[in-house]
Amino acid sequence: MLKAYRGDIIFTPTPQEFSVLEDGFVLVEDGTVKDVVGSLGAEYAEVPVIDRSGCLIIPGFNDLHVHAPQYPQAGLGFDCELLPWLDRYTFVDEARFADPDVAERWYRRFLVDLWQAGTLRFSAFATLHTASTWRLMELAQESGLRPLIGKVNMDRNAPDSLIESTAQSLADTETLIHRAAERTPNVGFIVTPRFVPSTTPELMEGLGELVAHYHLPVQSHLDENRSEVAWVRDLHPDIPTYAQVYEHYGLMPRGRTVMAHCIWLNDAERALLRDRQVTVAHCAQSNLNLQSGIMPARRYLDMGLQVALGSDVAAGHVLDMTRHIVMSIEASKALRFIPGHEDERPLRLAEAFYMATKQGGSFFGRVGSFESGYDFDALVVREGDNLLDLSVEERLERFLYAKGGAAIEERYVDGALVPRPFAEKE
């Protein structure tokens, strides 16, 4: 059925500039965008109109890197760098998800808060616990959101409470692959080795075989922290770079890989990521919180890398993607004060918005824009009185910098209105 959504429409078909239509219409048929028009001609006289005049209508947000079980620790431990932070906070937190009651309570809260923030699709790490990971997938299916979720794999260099055998890790992963395919049609499975230091060569080899056999996507971490990079070099002295470790074991499938952080890539790694069409998840807030560095987003874009945004909760302290759009811009400005980066242009608003919408959405299909043939993933934003007679673009900027998720009134995924998840149980 064809419908028309009326409002002030703004999106980014390209990262260079916004496409804006004040008081226009998005025509949606069976959940898919048909067109964006300024008025409804005679051929659309009988089309029902969902009138949101005075509101912004923007694409939904996509978070390409988030840790669902770390949500309880958001905002903690930022005097630490990455590796001590994992030991003191993250591993302690994640071990608690062996308890299904803990998982139930926190995963519900996590999904509701993503909905509140307008994040409609996301790629999430769970824990190594099969039952709790499955419960997250079930709850996500119930929520109306459309994520990719992965059981974390780790069989070395972690506390005893978070170590699994190689065989059990692979068996549990394959169990969840089948279960997701059969029972959670709107929640995809993504293979999730935590990072190279926590996965043995045998486990990585087995995961690579699963990726190839089931044609699955992969998510992990890459070149986040200098100490981590050095650790990988010690563990794999026979492989030239951190990125090539993943490639060596079949964990960098072309066009189906998300690598978070990627701050300290060398030339060979950048070339490899470009060749493998890897999506780089830029997590600016996290990288500053844990003193990891600033990813040179401008250079990566100029080199042809695909850069999306990730919240990286809980190393990032909020889920709201408006904060991460802003932080990515601010970090690119701060980078210009570092020798060697003085002449780089900072990210522009349209570029950062594109990263959180169309670029991130491309990992899920035709998502993140209002171009013809795209899924209608949309947010209706009422950002307040327009006392300054602002343009649509200026109103979007004010929403991103000063309003955030609290200004979102409605959320649509694939054309369906998504109400607050689990409201009947609260």
Image (tube, rainbow, N blue to C red):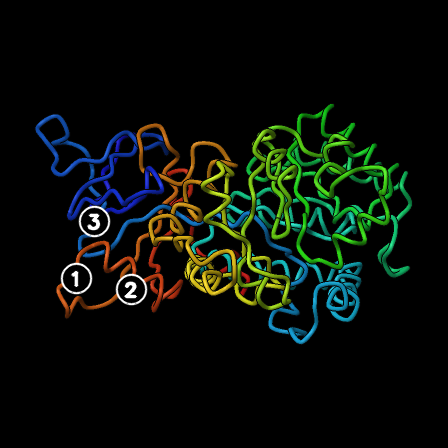
- CA gap between label 3 and label 1 equals 15 Å
Relative to 243, 400 lies left or right? left
Helix, strand or loop status at disc 2: helix
The residue that disc 3 covers is: 7
In this view, the residue in front, 144 or 253, is 253
Where is residue 73? Give x, y as percent. Answer: 66, 69
Q: Nearer the viewer, mark 3 or mark 1?
A: 1
Toward the bottom, the furthest residue is 79
User: Measuring 71% from the left and 35% from the top, which residue is drawn there?
Assistant: 179
Q: Mark 1 belongs to which amino acid? A: Leu
Q: Are marks 2 and 1 in contact (CB under 8 Å)?
A: yes
Toward the left, the furthest residue is 42
Q: Is residue 318 above or below residue 296?
A: below
Looking at marks 3 and 2 on the same chain, the residue that comes earlier in the sequence is marked by 3
- CA gap between label 3 and label 2 equals 17 Å
Tell me, for residue 390, which label it has, or none.
1
In this view, the residue in front, 192 or 144, is 192
Where is residue 175? Give x, y as percent. Answer: 78, 36
Tell me, for residue 13, which label it has, or none.
none
Where is residue 423? Give x, y as percent. Answer: 49, 60
Looking at marks 3 and 1 on the same chain, the residue that comes earlier in the sequence is marked by 3
Helix, strand or loop status at disc 3: strand
- For the N terminus, the image quarter is top left
The residue that disc 2 covers is: 398
Where is residue 244? Give x, y as percent. Answer: 73, 36
Q: Mark 2 belongs to which amino acid? A: Arg
**Local crowd size for mark 3, using a 10 Å CA cut-off: few (<14), some (14–19), many (≥20):** many
User: Measuring 31% from the left and 53% from the top, which residue is drawn there?
Assistant: 380
Relative to 210, 108 lies left or right? left
User: Measuring 78% from the left and 50% from the top, which residue is drawn there?
Assistant: 128
